[in-house]
Image (tube, rainbow, N blue to C red):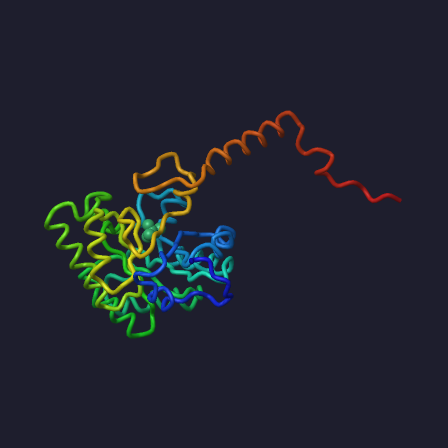
């Protein structure tokens, strides 16, 4: 069961214990109000750097800054009290050195109160993950399709299709697991490879466009709510919020134009003397 009655916030250690247990349920949120709705239904909320594309209309996550992540991380912490909150480390905040990574992670944990950070990358980031974990920073890894590497990957490419890609994805996942990540997002990885990795590494795997065999699943909230005009293959729309918003906005605009809003219920009267 992912719905727990305890008021204590779920920790990274709790999530780490869920290997091969009940599926870990996760969604992204960037705001206090959506976080408050998600809070009792999910095990962790990811304040993903996808906020750059979803909230700000950026073409990729590359321009997202550490300050943007901290502002939205704080909002999600204010809106939630039970789920673990994980904040993404944005591109440029952790790759240059282990020390830079620690300073950025420390800012996130201190300034938001979140319980963990997430960073992208495999084998080449393992040393950094170990450095952070040894210094008290719970780290969630992110392997497979890593959106911050869009400029070197040449686009959003599913991983594990060729023998070479499969081999590298397996090496990446094992390296991040051995480095001490408590969980790992596996994004855009062909099903048999994601399954094989989940069965062989110690770390809890969280799939997005990966495999039902992963130890848990995550989706971007706005994708699964049906807010976007286009839906990727790996997303199931569990709602159709765009149509609801369009209907409400159409009705509002019509009511303002024909002067039926505001009605007598929505205006303030003078005090009777
Ligand atoms: O930024 C994000 O929303 C993510 C998810 C796709 C896992 O990293």
Say left or right for 138 vs 74. left
The furthest residue to the bottom: 135
Give the total of numbered labels: 0
Q: Is residue 202 left or right of residue 136?
A: left
x and y, in percent, of residue 146 in the image: 25, 51
Q: What residue sits 28% from the left and 58% below the top?
A: 205
Counting from the top left corner in percent of width and height, residue 241 is at 47, 38
Quarter of the picture containing the N terminus is bottom left
Foreground residue, 241 or 120? 241
Q: Residue at x 27, y 63 (%)?
A: 203
In this rendering, is residue 256 above or below 35?
above
Look at 28% across and 67% down and name the residue there.
100
Left or right of 270 in this view: 99: left
Q: Check the image and report above or below for 247 versus 32.
A: above
Q: Quadrant of the C terminus?
A: top right
Furthest-left residue in this view: 163
Residue 51 picture location, percent across and down:
39, 49
Could you tell me which residue is drawn at 42 percent across and 64 percent down?
114
Q: Is residue 30 left or right of residue 180?
A: right
x and y, in percent, of residue 71 in the image: 44, 57
**Residue that protrudes farthest toward the top in the picture:** 258
């Amino acid at each position: 069961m992912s719905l727990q009655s305890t008021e204590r916030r779920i920790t990274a250690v709790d999530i780490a214990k869920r290997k091969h247990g009940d599926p870990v349920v996760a969604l992204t949120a960037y705001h206090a109000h959506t976080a408050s709705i998600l809070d009792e239904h999910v095990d962790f909320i990811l304040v993903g750097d996808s906020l750059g594309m979803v909230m700000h209309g950026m073409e990729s996550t590359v321009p997202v800054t550490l300050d943007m992540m901290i502002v939205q991380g704080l909002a999600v912490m204010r809106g939630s009290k039970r789920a673990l909150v994980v904040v993404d480390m944005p591109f440029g905040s952790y790759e240059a050195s282990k020390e830079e990574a620690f300073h950025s992670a420390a800012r996130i944990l201190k300034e938001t109160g979140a319980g963990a950070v997430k960073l992208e990358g495999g084998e080449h980031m393992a040393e950094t993950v170990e450095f952070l974990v040894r210094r008290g920073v719970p780290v969630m890894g992110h392997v497979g399709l890593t959106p911050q590497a869009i400029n070197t990957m040449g686009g959003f490419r599913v991983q594990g299709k060729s023998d070479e890609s499969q081999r590298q994805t397996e090496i990446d996942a094992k390296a991040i697991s051995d480095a001490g990540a408590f969980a790992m997002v596996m994004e855009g990885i062909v099903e048999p490879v994601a399954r094989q990795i989940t069965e062989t590494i110690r770390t809890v795997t969280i799939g997005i466009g990966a495999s039902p065999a992963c130890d848990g699943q995550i989706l971007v909230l706005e994708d699964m709510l049906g807010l976007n005009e286009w839906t990727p293959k790996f997303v199931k729309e569990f709602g159709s919020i765009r149509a609801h918003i369009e209907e409400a906005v159409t009705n509002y605009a019509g009511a303002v134009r024909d002067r039926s809003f505001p009605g007598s219920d929505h205006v303030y009267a003078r005090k009777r003397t």
